[in-house]
């Protein structure tokens, strides 16, 4: 019965204003993809398709299939700005995209990956 008296005690103290009232539970609507992000994704696919469509893969890793299938992001795509920044795009096949992620050293040596923060990540 310990927990019940504790509850009553807490309720009494709250009514006396000794402890602040409980905050009402708020239901936060959670959108899976924000409108802003959605617009960015749309802009990205619209912009990126002509960039790689019909082109050869620019990476040519040992597993290359030759034909570009999408964008490889030299600086990654962690931020919306990087995602759509054409200066850091490269037409690449899917195999090379995966290869670069799995072989970062290989990619860095050939300039297919650019470190975002030289100070912290330079070895
Ligand atoms: Zn390739």
Image: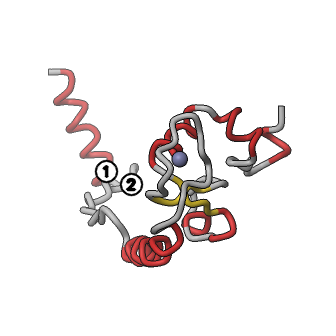
Label 2 to label 1: alpha-carbon separation: 6 Å
Relative horizontal placement of residue 64, taking residue 85 as reference (left or right): left
Q: State the residue lying farthest toward the top.
A: 1
Residue 42 lies left or right of residue 52; in this view the side is left
Q: Can you say whether 103 is above or below 75 in the image?
A: above
Image quarter hosting the N terminus: top left
At 28% from the left edge and 54% from the top edge, which residue is drawn?
Answer: 15
* Residue 38 placement: quadrant: bottom left
Q: Nearer the viewer, residue 6 or 51?
A: 51
Which residue appears at 20% of the width and 38% of the height?
8
112 on left or right of 3:
right
Q: The residue tagged with tag 2: helix, strand or loop?
A: loop
Task: Judge whether 95 appears above or below 28 on screen.
Answer: above
Query: Residue 35 versus residue 7: which sits nearer the camera?
Result: 35
Contact between labelled residues 1 and 2, with CB atoms less than 8 Å apart: yes
Residue 34 at x, y percent in the picture: 37, 70
- Residue drawn at x 24%, y 62% is 27
Quickly name the residue at label 1. 14
């Amino acid at each position: 019965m310990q927990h019940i008296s504790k509850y009553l005690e807490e309720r009494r103290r709250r009514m006396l204003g000794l402890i602040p009232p409980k905050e009402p539970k708020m239901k936060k609507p959670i959108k899976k993809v924000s409108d802003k992000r959605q617009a960015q994704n749309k802009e990205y696919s619209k912009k990126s398709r002509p960039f790689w469509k019909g082109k050869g893969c620019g990476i040519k890793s040992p597993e290359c299939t030759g034909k570009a299938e999408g964008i490889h992001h030299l600086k990654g795509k962690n931020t919306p700005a990087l995602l759509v920044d054409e200066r850091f795009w490269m037409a690449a096949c899917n195999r090379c995209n995966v290869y670069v992620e799995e072989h970062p050293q290989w990619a860095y040596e050939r300039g297919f990956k650019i470190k975002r923060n030289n100070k912290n990540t330079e070895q």
